Amino acid sequence: MLNFLKEAAAVVPSERQLNWFETERYAFVHFGVNTYTDREWGDGTESEEIFNPEKLDCDQWVEAIKSAGLRGLILTAKHHDGFCLWPSKYTEHSVKNSPCKKDVVKEAAEACRRGGIKFGFYLSPWDRNSKLYGTPEYNDYFCAQLEELLTGYGDIFCVWFDNACGEGENGKKQVYDFPRYIEMIRKYQPGAVIFNDYGPDTRWCGNEAGVARHAEWSVVPSELCHYSEVQTGPGPLADAGSLEYMYNSNKEIGTMPQILYTKGLTFTPAEIDMSIRPGWFWHENEDPHSLERLYKTYLRSCGANTCLNLNVPPNRDGLIDERDVKRLKEFGDMIEKTERRIPCTLERIGGTDTQPMYELKCSEPVKIGAVILEEDLTKGQRVESFRILLPSGGRIDYALYEGTCIGNKQICPLEDPFSIQNPLTDWLMDEKITGVRVQITAARDTVFMKDIYITEGPECML
């Protein structure tokens, strides 16, 4: 048992995964024929003539995205309808036969480079337009299009896949050759993270509501992520049960009771994907979600050991809706305040290798909005639980916040205008304090913290 815990503690991310965590938040841009049909899923019979964004301005997209503090853009180069936003040589169902004529993928990639953010793409494996869908030849067709995107648009930071699958017109269901797709991406864009339900680099969190689990582990069973690299041997109870049932929508993934049954562990962190609006494509009668909901999503994604992929859909003119532009700026301002550090000293003051205690001290009393914790993931994700304490001067310190795992980042709000967590007494909400203590209460092996700091937000943000 102890040896397996040490193995679990030593499961580490790749360089591309560390870079992805550093990116932290980015935009999903759903754009295509659905924008003009007012649908979410097209059927592949749409006329190319309907795609006509007369005011297409990808620099406007990037400016709006950057105002929210988002650091990348993933474009839906092809959705389920099979319509390609680039002039693919392998289909007529693309921008080359539309009034627009522009290579939207190129326009977006170049705007990202000008704006200093990263570029990636989504390529739907499900293609409701292709006559090859449902045959072995379809994987050749898909790889040909994938190669076009991997080799024609500069550096790609993320290739995003889903597993949507439907019956082709010939009645056959397509078997996707993901190992082949992954091999091609590694060949042409070795720095790109690959998102898929089953790995290899990042995975779906199991919902589109913007919420991570109560304990969102990056170290997860290989039964869930069978495209990811297995870094350990089997758990001590692997012969006594099975995790073949496991899927991303399960509430417990990576927690101790589950990993004991695994055949081996992988490092495959979760991504939170959610749209700024109710739908993924632009619909005139929809408004963006409230600032409160977006901010909660930020805390429950970037602040809970995941990255945030926030969808921002352009309208029929090819521009980000002004309602969304306004909300993105408000969102970015709130994130900036949350990240504003309060000067303090950090010192380890005791404990053991797996239960260390740290103290943060300010030179004068301050109002602390949040405590932010970051593990050194180059050593592995190890912390199982922690507490944030208010020093009392006596034998027992008052617990302001209690959490589970940490990972890349945990944002622990101590003053929260949205009531996500209110562990404080009424008097403390109005008091200034000189610091807090952080106690790791359980870990799988020696704890390595990358950073612990305090910030102003989310206090007084609205």
Image (cartoon, rainbow, N blue to C red):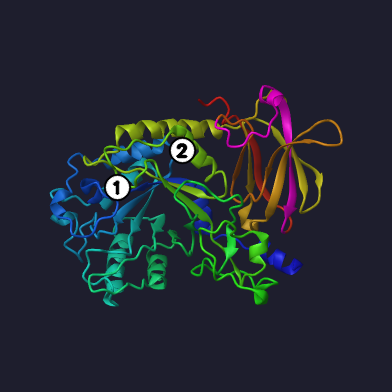
Relative to 55, 421 lies left or right: right
Count neighbours of disc 1 (C-alpha within 10 A) and say few if under 14, some if 14 to 19, many if 20 or more. many
Q: Nearer the viewer, residue 246 or 411?
A: 246
Task: Determine whether 180 is above or below 299 in the image.
Answer: below
Horizontal relation, residue 134 to residue 326: left or right: left
Mark pair 2, 1: CA separation: 24 Å
Up-down relation of residue 247 to residue 285 (above or below):
below
222 and 59: which is toward the camera: 222
**Residue 240: horizontal and vertical position, in percent?**
67, 75
The amino acid pointed to by label 2 is Leu
What residue does disc 1 label? 108
Q: Nearer the viewer, mark 2 or mark 1?
A: 2
Q: Which mark is residue 294?
A: 2
Q: Which residues are magenta?
A: 418-444
Q: Is residue 361 visible?
A: no
Image location of residue 17, percent across then percent down: 51, 57
Residue 97 lies in what quarter of the image?
Answer: bottom left
Question: What secondary structure is found at the residue carrying circle 2?
Answer: helix
Which quadrant holds residue 275? top left
Coordinates of residue 368 in the picture (x, y in percent): 65, 29
Q: Nearer the viewer, residue 441 or 34?
A: 34
In magenta stretch: residue 423: yes
